[in-house]
Image (cartoon, rainbow, N blue to C red):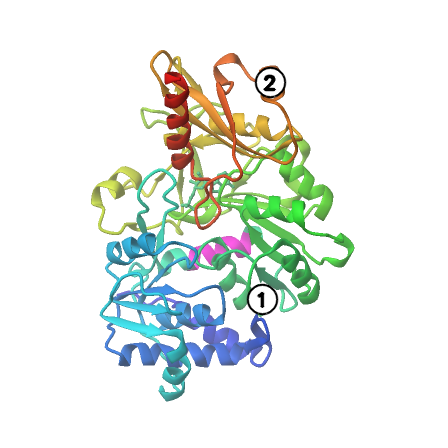
Amino acid sequence: MTQHLQIGDLITRAARTFGAAPALVHGDRTVSFAEFDRLTDRLGHALLARGLAPGDHVAVLVPNGIDGVVAYYALAKAGLVRVPLNARETDVELAYKMTDSAARALITDGRIPAEADIVIGTAELDAMIADAPDSPCRVARDPEAPLRLAYTGGTTGKPKAVVLTTRSELAEVANFLVDLLPDLTPDSVMLHAAPITHGSGAFFLPHLVKGARNVILPKFTPQAFVDAAVEHGATATFMVPTMIAMLLEDAVIDRDRLRLSRLCYGGAPIAPTLLARGIETIGPVFAQLYGQAEAPLAITCLQPWEHTPERLGSAGKPYTFVEVEIRGADGAPVPVGAEGEVVTRGPHTMSGYWQRPEATAETLGADGWLRTGDIGRLDADGFLHLLDRRHDVIISGGFNVYPREVEDVLLTHPAVREAAVVGVDDARWGQRVAAAVVLRDRVDDQALLDHCAERLAGFKRPRLIERWDELPKSAVGKSLRRTVRETLQKSLEVSDHA
Ligand code: AMP
């Protein structure tokens, strides 16, 4: 095994440098850097004492809070592999992930979706920590050994577990520090509003190593977010686009009282109209990340100063240490400006999918290039424009339709709050375009169809637009097109037979 910096080393070093300063805040509980180091050491020892062995998989099912963060980094120090589970998911979804990931243990705040050899309730953690030896816990792991398993969004099929290593985690921290958060100081404050099991969790270590504070919002509501951002002087946060839409709809925002310098967003496409409204309301602090579980949060980023009106539809440029290419169906790079699959390479990418050699071979080449499954193009200035997921592209009468383009057009109508566009089967055209919309104001069907007709070629126009009260979303706020498609397909069959 090569000698290598371990995640625990970063925590111990931060404790030596920033000692008594607050590292973590959640409600009225504050944990200093020194305490965080000690808590994670002790819990690391306690987990090993419960019979777990380095390399074992441990599912963690606790809502956003300090216990979860302590558990994550105790696991890293003990050489255990964390499998973060999102508390917003149903027992059926979680049981699948626990079984699929072969979790030996579960750390839980009470829910037990599936049995595991060892179940540890969060109520036990304090006693475990109190009884454990007060000495450094550092089980050195090979940089290529699994550190955590991250589940893909599962918007097109069953979620797959992505294996991420110490090598990928350290590279992820470096990517953030170089490109996204280059000016962190001990005075910086990260406000975690989204689940730390996903995107927001990636902001934890970059802030910690720079002596900055991580504040966890007990529960996201738009106004609670704004109030906490003001109270704690938040300088950075991470949101998925749905949260930004909620924030702009439902919160009273006085931008003079905010200290935010980075409102990072990503994880799903954002409508340029929403982004423009956000910048107008909150200021030029938006920073976009494009990434995926397989290449955690870092493929491209659109910097705040790059959010010019003509670039609002772009996902930005590759991170400094990340390569991006666009490849055609034959696997060869396409000329600048042409469409194809986005492929990427960098030290932060996964080592493969857990126990899915075929999916790994399809996705990750021996040369380290990762197929993202996203279709996009690079413009002459090197900016990436994402068109859609490869599997979501609609083929109608032989023409490709990117659902996202149609959604963006629907969203430019003032009465439309949310839109999901999918392809439904059609005997004549192969597929045709259908949409579900959530309205903010009344509007008749014809007005919406006319709005699309003025802006979209005939084959891209929705043949069916249904009004829904809400769109189905995954636990991290991604629109579940698969469910939308099934429902619209059924409606069409009913109306065709009527
Ligand atoms: P997941 O692995 O569940 O995080 O999903 C990753 C996928 O979300 C990517 O492959 C993209 O399709 C989508 N995605 C992530 N970030 C962005 C972004 N900034 N713009 C558009 N789509 C995004």
Residue 250 at least partly seen: yes
Mark 1 or mark 2: which is in front?
2
Residue 498, how many percent across, how many down?
40, 17
**Disc number at residue 446?**
2
Reading the chain from its start, which is encountered first: label 1 or label 2?
1
Chain part drawn in magenta: 170-178
Q: Does 303 appear above or below 111?
A: above
Residue 112: quarter of image: bottom left
Instruction: Name the secondary structure under disc 2.
Output: helix
Q: Is residue 82 left or right of residue 228?
A: left
Identify the residue at image location x=40%, y=87%.
130
The percent position of residue 347, horizontal first and vertical second, equals 39, 51
Q: Give the amino acid type for the residue marked by disc 2 in the picture.
A: Gln
Q: Which residue is mark 1?
A: 215
Which quadrant of the structure image shows residue 113?
A: bottom left
- 347 or 106, which is in the foreground? 106
Q: Residue placed at 30% from the left, 58% from the top?
A: 144
Asked if residue 237 lies in the magenta stretch, the reply is no
Q: What x and y, as percent, mark residue 467?
A: 53, 31
Image position of 458 with respect to 345: above or below: above
